[in-house]
Amino acid sequence: MAAEAAALAARLPALVAEAEKIANTVALGQHGRRRAGMGETFWQYRPSLPGEPVTRIDWRQSARSHRAYVRETEAEIAQTVYLWCDLSPSMIWSSSQNGDTPPLKRDRAILMLLALATLLHNGGERVRLLTPRGVAPLPAGASRIATKLAQALMAEQAAQNEAPGNATLPLAAALPQHARLVIASDFLCLEDEIRSLLRNLAAAPVRSFLLHIVDPAEATFPYSGRVRFSGAEAEPDLILPHVETLQRDYRAVFAEWQDELRALATAAGHTLLSHVTDQAPAPALLALSEAIAMRGDSMRRGA
Amino acid sequence: MVFTAPALLAALALLPAIWWLLRARPPAPRRVVFPPVTLLLRLRQERNDAATPPVWLLALRIAAATLLILGFADPVRPGNPMPLPGSGTLLLAIDDGVMSASSWPERVAAARMVLSAAAHGGRPVILLRTANRDILATAHSASGASKVGTQPASLSPASAAHAAELLEASRPAPWPIDRAAAALALRSLRDAGTSVGGIVYISDGVATPVAVPPTQADSKGAKESAAHADEAFATALRNLASVQEIRIKDGSPVVLLPRRGGVSPENQPAPESVPDNKTGETNPSGDANVVATAVIVPDNAPRLLRIRAHAQDGGTIGLSEVTAPAFAHEVPVPLALPAAMRNRIDMLTVDGVPSAAAALLLDEGDRVRPVGIISVGVSDTPLVGPLFYLRRALAPNADIREGSVSSLLSQPLSVMIAPDGALADSDTRKRVAEWVRGGGVLIRFAGRTLSGGGDDTPATDSVEETPKAPTDTIAQSLLPVPLLANARQLGGAMSWGKPQPLAPFSSTSPFHGLPVSTDVSISRQVLARPASDLGDHSWARLADGTPLVTHSTLDKGDVILFHVTATADWSNLPLSGLFVSMLERLIEHANGVDAPADDAMLSPVLTLDGDGALGPPPPFARGLAANRFGAEVVSPEHPPGLYGARADRRALNVGDTIRRLDPLTPTGALTDPTGHRPDHAYGPTLIALALALLCVDAVWTLALRGGALLRVRALTRGRRSPQSRALRCSILIVGGLGALSATGGSASFAQSPAPPSSAPLPSDSPVTNPTPAKPVSSAPDTTPGVANAPVPQAALETRLAYVLTGDSEVDTVSQEGLQGLSTYVNARTSAVLGHPDGVRPGTDDLSYYPLLYWPVTANAQTTPAMTAALTSFMAHGGIIVIDTQGVDPASAPRQSASGDDEASFAGEAPGAAAALRRVTAGLPIPPLTKLDDHHVLAHTFYLLHDFPGRYAGQPVWVAREGEAENDDVSPVIIGAADWAHVWALDADGNAPFAAIPGGDEQRRTAYRFGVNAVIYALTGNYKADQVHVPAILKRLGQ
């Protein structure tokens, strides 16, 4: 696992670069409405009203004219989007024997999250990384959000290596109300855990967007012969003969499971998107960002 | 079908156990990491997970086990044994000499049958191999010491199985059998009281051939002794017991003989057509193509022979099919090949007759004529070196050695080639003349030295025409015809003539028949003095009739002169293909190597084994005296093969002494071995098959499991499915084991010796061969020790150099003189010179220096290395200033008489003239002229009209202008004016030596001459063009 963390560290710069590239492509197509020159927290100057405390007057601005102005900051309605990346061992797996296609599920998840973070950051949203120990502090040194997140992820992966914990799903209690949460995971855990998490999130309320990362081998089951299957985590082994005859059954089972997941998510008001790792990340990112924008708008309207 | 160990068949009862084991332990599954393994749990209830082994696996393993059990039970098919004569001990005599090699497998099969029958009867066997070394050695010692003779150890009764082992291990010998020796052995056997119940004799059917050693005049006696040997052997056999003789019908022996006819046996067998020296014309007679003679046993049906000619590397370069008529004893083998190809024949073999007798090795001397080239200083310079074209023209057809005359004369040579200037020394000429008288052919090339008389040939001074015998003149000058002093220039700016083409070759010329290419033209040549017999000496002429190649015989040898250079400056002949053909003709025309007919021992290098394949010599082979080749009968001590070092390699062939093969009269009742066969054991075949099946099983199981090993390999070699690899592996293994079982199964016992791998025909230079002496290049290494020496300072800046004489006073003055000159040059010109160096030519590398100052003292001596280094220096553009530092009083009177009488005083240098002649003896000094103010040297920097040194008025000699060599730059400046002293500056900048008669004016002029010489050395003929500027301007103005 330590070697895995080192390998991740080696890959992160490339992931950051690619994520920003993808984000740029998507951003050019979607947004274009950035407010120019406005600080994040400044909202407006308004004439001071009688009876207002003198301390609120912005003297610098008031000195330019005859009236006293008050500097108003923007109301704290900018949404913070929390990102959760599943770093459990089952994510560090790819069906490819040697090459990069398809990549590790974790790598693809990180790529998607970094790209999404860049996109959101450019759109004026706040992005934070959620870890099993709560919201991760972003390092102050780096300027770009993707780099910050990457560094935080690296630290998180290292922490995972030292003290393995439940890394598949986040804790709902760590989130403030009305936050938005993006979970990139393969959701290979007990169904009850998923159900309870989604319920808790809905109760918070926290809107969440589930990005289901799927390896192509997990979807198509391209094996044959007599095979001993062993899981990436602590699952018991399973020996199956004539595996090639089980393909159709397995695909049915897999589709059924995906449907269950989607039903769970929809029931709690969340959104589930599936992404197979041998496909291009950009379309999936577009779909995800659209979903966040739409839900965000509807939520804002609802609020 | 009989089982030798039927009890083992009970193990077949274990077969069901295998089936049970397979059911109990199915093959382990492949392991795959699959994260959503929990999803698979939903599939489980649909399949039942019974581990049934595949049917094919079960069948495979049971079949393998069955085969193993059957194999170890050792089934044997009983044979049909041969009836054997008598009872009790059986004597099996087998001819394993050179005549039986062609049908050796059949012979061994017959012998095996006899032994199998003997084994059935439980009879002990005595195996007598008539070409066995023991037998031969015993016979020799017996005949030498006492007639009693000891019984050879091998001639004792043993079991049939032991005899069979001996037989399987034996190979046919590459020497003939000796029936006389075998008869002696049989007699000693009888004397020892060994009882023999019956005899089977597997004979080669050939009577002992009559050896024809040419030295043995009494061939009748030889014939009688040969017949006597056969008779004695037959009698000895019959005296022991009743004899049954087996003859193998097919594979009758063939002996290849070196080509006979006209060539007496003392001469080496020469496959090439023999040139006739008198007319110099090769005789393309009808049998010129015959390379060998095939001797066969007469038969009543014609026989087709395919004779294959092998090159050195073993490749076939020719194939000849001859049909021997019925009842013929011999048939000539023609092989139509160009001479160049025929030269490359190394060995002749007969297809389908693997035998040392049917392999004819050709001598080294048969093909490649060793040609020596006398190397002079700068042989290697591309395009202008005198040996450049020669080497390329000779390389395809001749074995070239290079070196100095003495090193060349120490080795056998057919032709010696002397480029211009190589024979300038009269002592050398004398030695070469001796060699030519002994039968050598000397080919000379003309050139500057020959035309300018730099070589003090008698041709130039033979005006008085001393009445000498012509051969003496030739021996002295080594020129076939007397020459005129000057070269003839054909064509050029100042000549009406045009370069001349060649005339067709006359019929008496060895070049007759060569096409004269029209693009060959001669622009310069040396001329022969007209004489009445000049036409007889000319082998090639120009179109206007002047001879181009002349020759003359000198006792047994020839002296041939090309009237042009071997480089492309006088003519373009060396560039043409005609040159190659002419040299080839000349070399063919030359006598071959004088075969070393002494008794020098030549050690065996490569010998033939019984199958006619070349290989390293056996340990018991001994050297053979050179004069015994062609007469020595092949024997264990002298197996057929190649003897001696590469330079004088000789071939000893079986056919050397055989002229005729006759059938042998049968010794006993003839028996035909066909129809009988020995027992055949199936055990090894079955076991090999079982092992093959187990291998297939192992490979398949591995592939099924997708073992890590296989998968890693499959990945590294690209995406290849393990199954296909496994399939391939298994096919390979089955194939290999199949071959194994084929060999193992044919042998009737398990410990059959591996058949000796027949060695391929090795290339000519095996590792055991002592490396032949490389052609010694006498050109000294001009850069000794440069490889690890630091960079010499002279390479970093331009420096003048002087030759160290060993006289410290002279050397100091030289150093100071050149230092003074360098300072002067640095001050006056843009040339920048460093400190001068003292050099020793031949030891130091001269290639950095443009100008070499050489004070010649009276006791100056040169070494060949020094001469060679200076020659190389001059040829590469260096200029040597030779200064005698004074006038020899011996030659002074001639000087004063020649005109410049007011010239005054010059220092005396007694002995300098002789020293000058001595030290320049081997140098290619061009024709000289006196330096005047028209010479470029008078213009290169200052315009000079006289060239004083310390002594004024001394003449200065430079190369004559108008020679095409070296861009018209004189390689030497020879004078006596003692420049070093007048140039010399001591450490304080003062001139320590006075100029005589004196004055700063003379010193200044001397410095200016020095500057001109340096600039001349640095710029060559650059200023020569400027000389003509006034004339050109004048012409333009008109």
Image (cartoon, rainbow, N blue to C red):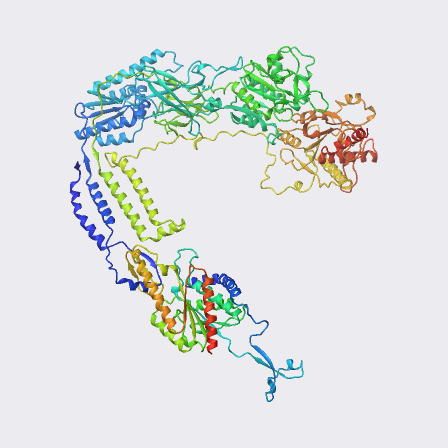
Residue B297 left/right relative to B487: left
Classify residue B23 by image quadrant: bottom left
Viewer-nearest residue: A251 or B175: A251
- Residue nearer the viewer, B155 or B746: B746
Res B978 visible: no
Residue A206 falls in which quadrant of the image? bottom left
Snapshot quadrant of residue B543 = top right
Relative to B57, say whether B151 is above or below: above
Is residue B455 found left or right of B998 in the rendered image?
left
Query: Residue A60 location in percent, x, y?
Result: 64, 80
When the figure is inspected, residue B28 is found, relative to residue B553, above or below; the finding is below
* Left or right, B399 with reference to B27: right
Picture coordinates of residue B876, whole percent (x, y) = 65, 32
Q: Quadrant of the N terminus of chain A?
A: bottom left
Please state if B556 lies on the left or on the right of B796 as rendered. left
The residue drawn where x is 23% and y is 40% is: B686
Q: Position of residue A300 (x, y in %)?
A: 48, 76
Residue B936 place in picture, x, y as percent: 75, 31
- Work out whether B432 lies above or below B865: above
The tally of labels here is: 0
- Residue B850 visible to the viewer: yes
Taking depth in this image into account, of A69 and B75 the one nearest to the observer is A69
